[in-house]
Image: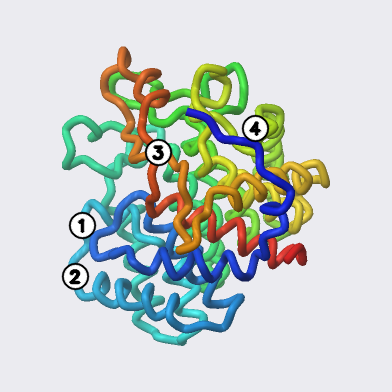
Amino acid sequence: MSVTTVSPDRQRTDASELLLRLAERTRRYDFSVWFWGDAIAIDGLLEAAELSGERASSDHCLRFYHRWLSGAPGWVDHLTPGVGLLRLYEQTGEAELLAGARRLAAWLTETVPHTAAGQPLYRPDLPPYRHTVWVDTLYHEPPFFAALARHTGEERWADVALDCWEVHARSLSRGDGPILGHSYDTGAGLLRGYGWGRGNGWALLGMVDTLEWLADDHPRRSTAVAWMRELAEAILSLQDVSGCWRTLLDDREAYLEVSTAAFFGAAFLKGARLGVLDERYAQAAETAWAAVCAHVDGEGSLWGVSACTYASTHPDDDVQMYKTLPTEVNVWGQGAGLRLAAERIRSGLG
């Protein structure tokens, strides 16, 4: 599988038009039970609503939050789109949304089991994953805790955000560089899926999102920025001329995959906009944008995105799984595309 070079006419796709097209397609998805890709899809839909002024996307998201608020917490709640919950609270003033965010934070820190090293074990109900930490969590949890600190004025949540960031980054690294693995089995002591492309996209975009919410004078901010830059630099060096990255970043036999362009493009542009990444990243994001534009069809479906990628529990199957998964249209691809289009608008690139 491969991704073709993008023609110049597709590079000029208007970000506002593409944002609305992606949003309309993404609103077909149901979020009644949280899953891995839902947070970035909801974040992207709320970006579309805020930047365009249309209510359909925010109303779509609000409906599922209201449904979630009516039930008791469960193990899938570690996938609750926490930042979106707080953004909707800010927009609507609905007190129950902030109460739900507080409930979520308490559940994540007090009910979820943790190892002695502080690693959260979010799925103790699933035998293959009861001792597992995931790279995707770097997108879900640290930005939520940091945003909660900003919205409530309770600074302890900023430290929780950075603790979560650090324990995942340390657990998922191999010791010879900043690239992260897909999962770490704390019971077996096994790192799996090293260099998973989209997984490192979850991580890098989550890190940049966390920095947006983190106070400039936080005593640990400079360390967090250094971690993020080290990962970003390693990822930048591995971009293909097509604008995409591979399903396994440093494996030349792994295929080029479109969600990597959306994830890293969004992270690079946002990092440059926030002043924590330099101009090289904005230039790389241009190539990534061209790749994404070339793979969005007329109804707003982003093609070329690898299918659901579970953290393998069989080491012999690890590499083959990442290199042979089919591509499709799915919710995490749509969300990442929305995030990238929104960042172009916020960066004044149109």
Q: Which amino acid does label 2 sit on?
A: Gly
Q: Residues within 10 Å of mark 2 (few under 14, many from 20)?
A: few
Tell us which disc is closer to us: 1 or 3: 3
Q: Which amino acid does label 4 sit on?
A: Ile
Q: Which amino acid does label 1 sit on?
A: Gly
Q: How crowded is mark 3: few (under 14 residues within 10 Å), some or many (20 or more)?
A: some
Q: Alpha carbon of mark 4 to alpha carbon of mark 3: how far?
A: 22 Å
Q: Alpha carbon of mark 4 to alpha carbon of mark 1: how far?
A: 35 Å
Tell us which disc is closer to us: 4 or 1: 4
Residue extending furthest top?
A: 316
The label on residue 327 is 3
Sequence-earlier tag: 4 or 1: 1
Q: Which residue is drawn at 40% across and 22% down?
A: 191
Residue that carries the numbered disc 4 in the rendered image: 235
Q: Alpha carbon of mark 1 to alpha carbon of mark 3: how far?
A: 30 Å
Sequence-earlier tag: 4 or 3: 4
Residue that carries the numbered disc 1 in the rendered image: 74
Q: Alpha carbon of mark 2 to alpha carbon of mark 3: how far?
A: 34 Å
Residue that carries the numbered disc 2 in the rendered image: 71
Q: Which residue is drawn at 54% across and 55% down?
A: 337
- Mark 3, secondary structure of its residue: strand
Image coordinates for residue 158, horizontal then vertical, percent: 55, 57
Q: Alpha carbon of mark 2 to alpha carbon of mark 4: how far?
A: 40 Å
Tell us which disc is closer to us: 4 or 3: 3
Image coordinates for residue 175, horizontal then vertical, percent: 56, 18
